[in-house]
Image: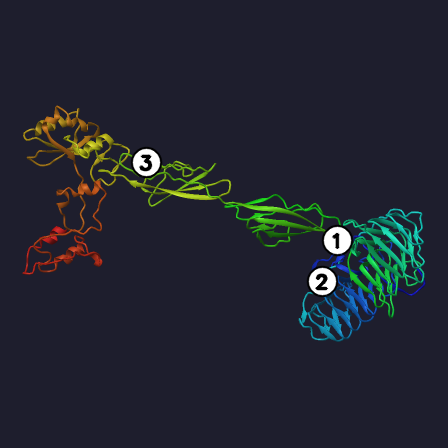
């Protein structure tokens, strides 16, 4: 380095893996080195491997008066300091302390982690300050004057002194970013044997020393790696680096310097494409021989400008400055020890992105079905340390966080995964498609049917045209299934509604259909009438039906028409006049088998007893039929309602019709014509209602008397008929 007044400048970009000190404060997301325009002093400074201890103020970023950081953050693991007025458009982050002079403007936030647990002032800002963001400090802080638009937050027991913050003076856990990992340190290729001393054009390759003596131009011809032993330029005029990208949209110009870099007065120009973010200089010098101290990179004052990112892991970065001088760096400056910017230095944030495109895999396409109404996307990457972000489009929707590898998708659409590297922020994308399969299956429960005396059970006829359909039957309304319910054709034995649910195994969608089982016509429950409706046999239609349809395993629990015991039924045989004794003897013979005679009194033509069902048709045949007038079932006795016993029901055979056709008369109004209804003294109609012989209890459907006998007392035959 020359012994001439110089200015601090530019640092370089290469990734050194450091151990990040953990602070017992609330931390926000890991910041990247490429988030910073200026970063000086890594976590191991000043004792890191190969490092040379920096001059005062030590491991730090120091910016002299009228310094201007346009874009990006400014950071250090130790100290960020200004010595005069300065402008920061972004945030300032320090692992320990922040010391700003008067007339400083900060467009972002200020954080100071105080990793050394110092007890003094951790953030100190002078007068006429303009802080647009928040101040999060793990300790005491002071602002000499000006404005703080955001809040100031510090732990309990710590203090803030200064103008009232717009967001309040808060006591709590400060929010501190995790400081970045420094760029990796590259193992350089060997330098060459050719010195560069004058205006020339060079191609990617290995060179020895560059020593320009003023007003010289070196053209870097095309993207690639340029390796030097050292760069030590001088002279009264400006030397120029001209970067020729040859109109290539890809590739970078990378400059490796084994020793120190002294640019003196310097200019940078671009031809045929390219930009500062595609230029990278890494310097492994230790700053020995530099009059300003251990600075591996130095650029003089005046109107010097440098384009590119500088990374100096072992020593500092310095730019000169002074009144009337406006040195400019377009790129970024990173040092493992110190960045020291002279007065009036401007850094325009345009970092070199040192990363490799990551792997991005959005996983297999997914299908939303009736059984799976949401799906989990299966994003992944073989690149370590990446972050994920999903964006749904074309109708897609993500439920919950979208910045994870496996979010939940709730609708059909396009889902684009972006994977971003931890260093450099390089990205890659992949797409997964989510479709829907919610077509309902076909369901057919079959035709309705009846259960009758002839068909005591029925088989339902469910079906579906859906491949592999799953069946499930549910009875209701009194229905009962006697077989498995998960088959297409179950067996039922009761009147009711039978609902078939069909499930498509491919998507879990369901459809339903119903079949109804009705009660078919029967004279006797479970026994159908003769198809002709009438028979001429002496045993009549009831016993004829019983003979042909008798099932000894089924009983008539109501005993409405028959009285059956095992394989026999009680019957009444009415003999012809004068044939009683002959008929009785034949009926009791083994050929007929009448037993359990019932005494009907004397004289009588009725023979009553228990008779085998299998012998009923013998009564229609000779020789016995010549002695019989007719045969009928011995009808069961009727139970009474109320206290009055009426013979009208049996006399009119309405009891048989009621049972055979499943009728009860409910809701039917019956008209009665008679001489009177309730003329007898004592209101006997009310007594009959109370006894249950007449309707009208609790005021429900009483007998409606349209016209009562008007001339005194009559026999009230009408009331008797109503009973």
> Mark 1–mark 3 contact, CB under 8 Å?
no
The residue indicated by pointer 2 is 176
The residue indicated by pointer 3 is 457
Task: Work out how far the residue at label 3 is from the one at label 2, CA to CA, in angstroms.
Answer: 79 Å
Dot placed on the residue nearer the N-terminal end, 1 or 2: 2
652 left or right of 45 in image: left
Q: Where is residue 89 in the image (x, y as percent from the top left)?
A: 75, 66
- Residue situated in front as seen by the camera: 76 or 642: 76
> Which of labels 1 and 2 is toward the front?
1
The way the protein has been coloured in the rendering is: rainbow
Q: Is mark 2 on a helix, strand or loop?
A: strand
Residue 624 appears anywhere in the view: yes
Q: Is mark 3 on a helix, strand or loop?
A: loop
Crowding around mark 3 (Cα neighbors within 10 Å: few <14, some 14 to 19, many 20+) is some
Q: Position of residue 227 (x, y in %)?
A: 88, 49
The residue indicated by pointer 1 is 424
Relative height, residue 655 to residue 164 (above, below): above
Asked which quadrant contains residue 582, the reply is: top left
Dot placed on the residue nearer the N-terminal end, 1 or 3: 1
Name the residue at 16% across, 52% down. Answer: 693
1 left or right of 441 in image: right
Dot placed on the residue nearer the N-terminal end, 3 or 2: 2
Asked which quadrant contains residue 512, the reply is: top left
432 left or right of 95 in image: left
> Which of labels 1 and 3 is toward the front?
1
């Amino acid at each position: 380095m020359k012994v001439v007044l110089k200015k601090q400048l530019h640092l370089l970009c290469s990734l050194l893996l450091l151990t990040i000190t953990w602070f017992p404060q609330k931390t926000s997301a890991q910041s990247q080195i490429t988030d910073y325009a200026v970063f000086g002093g890594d976590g191991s400074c000043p004792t890191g491997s190969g490092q040379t201890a920096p001059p005062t103020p030590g491991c730090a970023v120091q910016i002299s008066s009228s310094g201007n950081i346009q874009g990006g953050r400014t950071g250090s693991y130790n100290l960020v300091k200004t010595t005069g007025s300065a402008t920061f458009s972004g945030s300032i982050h320090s692992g320990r302390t922040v010391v700003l002079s008067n007339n400083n403007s900060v467009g972002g936030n200020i954080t100071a982690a105080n990793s050394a647990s110092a007890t003094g002032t951790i953030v100190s800002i002078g007068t006429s300050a303009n802080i647009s963001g928040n101040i999060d400090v793990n300790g005491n802080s002071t602002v000499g004057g000006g404005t703080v638009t955001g809040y100031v937050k510090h732990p309990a027991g710590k203090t803030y002194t200064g103008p009232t913050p717009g967001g309040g003076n808060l006591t709590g856990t400060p929010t501190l970013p995790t400081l970045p990992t420094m760029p990796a340190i590259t193992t350089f290729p060997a330098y060459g044997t050719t010195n560069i001393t004058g205006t020339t054009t060079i191609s990617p390759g290995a060179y020895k020393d560059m020593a320009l003596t003023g007003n010289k131009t070196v053209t870097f011809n095309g993207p690639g790696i340029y390796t030097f032993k050292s760069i030590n330029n001088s002279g009264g005029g400006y030397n120029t680096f001209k970067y020729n990208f040859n109109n290539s949209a890809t590739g970078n110009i990378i400059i490796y310097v084994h020793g120190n870099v002294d640019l003196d007065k310097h200019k940078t120009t671009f031809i045929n494409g390219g930009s500062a973010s595609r230029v990278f200089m890494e310097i492994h010098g230790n700053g020995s021989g530099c009059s300003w101290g251990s600075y591996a990179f130095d650029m003089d004052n005046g109107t010097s400008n440098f384009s590119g990112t500088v990374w100096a892991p072992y020593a500092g970065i310095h730019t000169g400055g002074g009144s009337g001088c406006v040195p400019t760096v377009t790129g970024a400056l990173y040092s493992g020890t110190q960045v020291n910017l002279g007065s009036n230095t401007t850094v325009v944030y345009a970092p070199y992105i040192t990363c490799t495109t990551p792997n991005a895999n959005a996983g297999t396409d997914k299908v939303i079905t009736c059984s799976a109404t949401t799906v989990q996307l299966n994003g992944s990457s073989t690149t370590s340390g990446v972050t994920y972000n999903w964006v749904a489009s074309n109708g897609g929707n993500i439920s919950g966080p979208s910045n994870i590898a496996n979010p939940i998708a709730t609708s059909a659409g396009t889902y684009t995964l972006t994977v971003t590297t931890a260093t450099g922020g390089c990205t890659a994308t992949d797409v997964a498609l989510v479709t829907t399969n919610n077509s309902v299956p076909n369901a057919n429960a079959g035709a309705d049917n009846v259960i009758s005396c002839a068909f005591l059970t029925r088989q339902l006829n469910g079906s579906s045209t859906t491949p592999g359909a799953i069946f499930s039957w549910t009875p209701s309304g009194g229905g009962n299934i006697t077989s498995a319910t998960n088959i297409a054709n179950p067996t039922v034995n009761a009147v009711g509604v039978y609902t078939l649910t069909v499930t498509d195994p491919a998507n879990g969608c369901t459809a339903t259909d119903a079949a109804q089982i009705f009660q078919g016509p029967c004279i006797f429950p479970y026994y159908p009438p003769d198809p002709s409706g009438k028979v001429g046999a002496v045993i009549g239609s009831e016993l004829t039906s019983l003979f042909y349809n008798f099932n000894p395993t089924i009983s008539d629990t109501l005993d409405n028409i028959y009285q059956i015991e095992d394989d026999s039924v009680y019957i009444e045989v009415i003999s012809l006049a004068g044939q009683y004794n002959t008929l009785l003897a034949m009926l009791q013979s083994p050929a007929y088998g009448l037993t359990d005679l019932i005494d009907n009194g004397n004289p009588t033509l009725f023979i009553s007893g228990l008779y085998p069902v299998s012998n009923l048709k013998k009564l229609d045949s000779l020789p016995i039929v010549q002695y019989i007038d007719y045969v009928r079932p011995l009808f069961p006795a009727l139970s009474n309602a109320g206290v009055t016993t009426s013979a009208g029901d049996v006399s009119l055979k309405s009891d048989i019709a009621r049972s055979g056709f499943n009728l009860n008369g409910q809701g039917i109004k019956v008209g009665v014509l008679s001489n009177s209804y309730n003329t007898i003294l004592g209101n006997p109609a009310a007594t009959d209602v109370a006894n249950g012989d007449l309707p009208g209890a609790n005021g429900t459907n009483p007998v409606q008397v349209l016209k009562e006998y008007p001339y005194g007392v009559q026999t009230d035959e009408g009331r008797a008929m109503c009973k």
